[in-house]
């Protein structure tokens, strides 16, 4: 890999853990899937809202949204409202690679996953979960490879206490993530609002027109902020030239492990140099 960029502080451990592998890894999809799986599988990261550690919906169980998109080919796979399978990004990848479809949802996504050998394993959900920053902790990862390709992936258990079947922005192409041959972007935040703005598509569109990722992120977040001053959104982006950017309306965040509060929106970058 040339570099990897991911949302939120918990991404640091996942990236650190895979560091040696990344140096020799050329496949962006493998890099993204492994990085996201690390957090999805770790209950320690409750109360962030990814995988096994995520908070339940209003009916008391977790439903996952996850997706992957490849920049060069626009290949895309997603699952939404998937129950009982925390490594949802791997199911999204299976949709992309082993089905004729791009997105599967709810019960149908679960049936597909079972058919592909994924094991349903619901773990107990925490009581009275306090999610830092109102629950905006979706994990998004962008990888840019030495072979000059790039890809993006996201995984979330979604807004805490959401209605069963609710789908947020995270797994929607153009909403929570997008990639084309020039750039990639993903979001975290209030998905019921974010999906109205297609921010990931907008950012990548601006990158395709020659804007830097930082510029593109700022323009899109400012544009959204002008229309809605109350929603939380955080975006990261990268381009094929190896530049990255980020912007957010997030005022502060709480470290899920230490419960300490910090200003702004944290993101993590790993670069081979
Ligand atoms: C959702 N966007 O389901 C997700 C939640 C989230 O950080 O934070 N994201 O609305």
Image (cartoon, grey):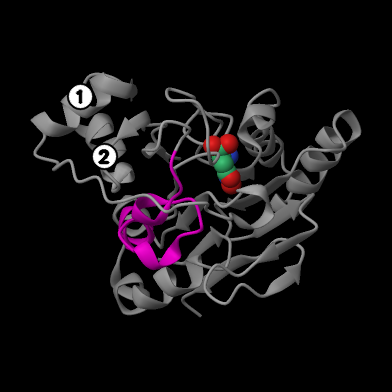
Q: In which quadrant will I find the N terminus?
A: bottom left
In screen coordinates, is 171 left or right of 222? Answer: left
In the rendered image, residue 82 lying in the magenta stretch gets the answer no
- Say if residue 140 shows up in the picture: yes
Quadrant for ligand 1 reads: top right
Q: Which residue is mark 2?
A: 84
Snapshot quadrant of residue 266:
bottom right
Q: Nearer the viewer, mark 1 or mark 2?
A: 2
In screen coordinates, is 20 left or right of 201? Answer: left
Q: Which residues are magenta?
A: 33-56
Given the current orientation, which residue lies at the most extreme right position? 226
Q: Are marks 1 and 2 in contact (CB under 8 Å)?
A: no
Snapshot quadrant of residue 241:
bottom right
Q: Earlier in the sequence, mark 1 or mark 2?
A: 2
Residue depicted at 68% across the width and 54% down the height: 133
Q: Residue 79, how many percent across, how many down?
A: 35, 30
Secondary structure found at label 1? loop
Residue depicted at 53% across the width and 41% down the height: 160
Given the current orientation, which residue lies at the most extreme front position? 127
- Say if residue 179 shows up in the picture: no
């Amino acid at each position: 890999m040339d570099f990897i960029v991911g949302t939120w502080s918990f991404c640091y451990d996942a990236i650190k853990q895979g560091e040696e592998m990344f140096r020799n890894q050329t496949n962006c999809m493998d890099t993204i899937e492994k990085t996201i799986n690390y957090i999805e599988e770790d209950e320690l990261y409750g109360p962030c809202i990814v995988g096994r550690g995520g908070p339940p919906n209003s009916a008391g169980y977790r439903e996952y949204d996850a997706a992957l998109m490849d920049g060069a080919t626009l290949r895309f796979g997603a699952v939404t409202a998937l129950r009982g399978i925390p490594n949802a990004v791997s199911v999204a990848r299976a949709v992309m690679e082993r089905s004729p479809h791009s997105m599967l949802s709810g019960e149908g996504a679960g049936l597909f996953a079972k058919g592909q050998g994924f094991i349903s394993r619901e773990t107990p959900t925490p009581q009275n979960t306090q999610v830092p920053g109102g629950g905006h902790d979706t994990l998004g990862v962008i990888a840019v490879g030495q072979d000059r390709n790039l890809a993006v992936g996201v995984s979330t258990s979604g807004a805490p206490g959401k209605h069963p079947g609710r789908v947020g922005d995270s797994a929607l192409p153009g909403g929570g993530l997008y990639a084309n041959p020039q750039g990639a972007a993903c979001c975290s935040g209030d998905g019921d609002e974010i999906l109205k703005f297609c921010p990931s598509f907008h950012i990548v569109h601006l990158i395709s027109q020659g804007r830097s990722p930082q510029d593109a992120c700022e323009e899109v977040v400012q544009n959204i902020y002008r229309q809605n001053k109350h929603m939380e959104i955080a975006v990261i982006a990268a381009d094929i030239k190896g530049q990255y950017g980020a912007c957010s309306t997030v005022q502060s965040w709480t470290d899920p492990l230490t419960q300490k509060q910090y200003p702004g929106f944290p993101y993590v970058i790993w670069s081979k140099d």
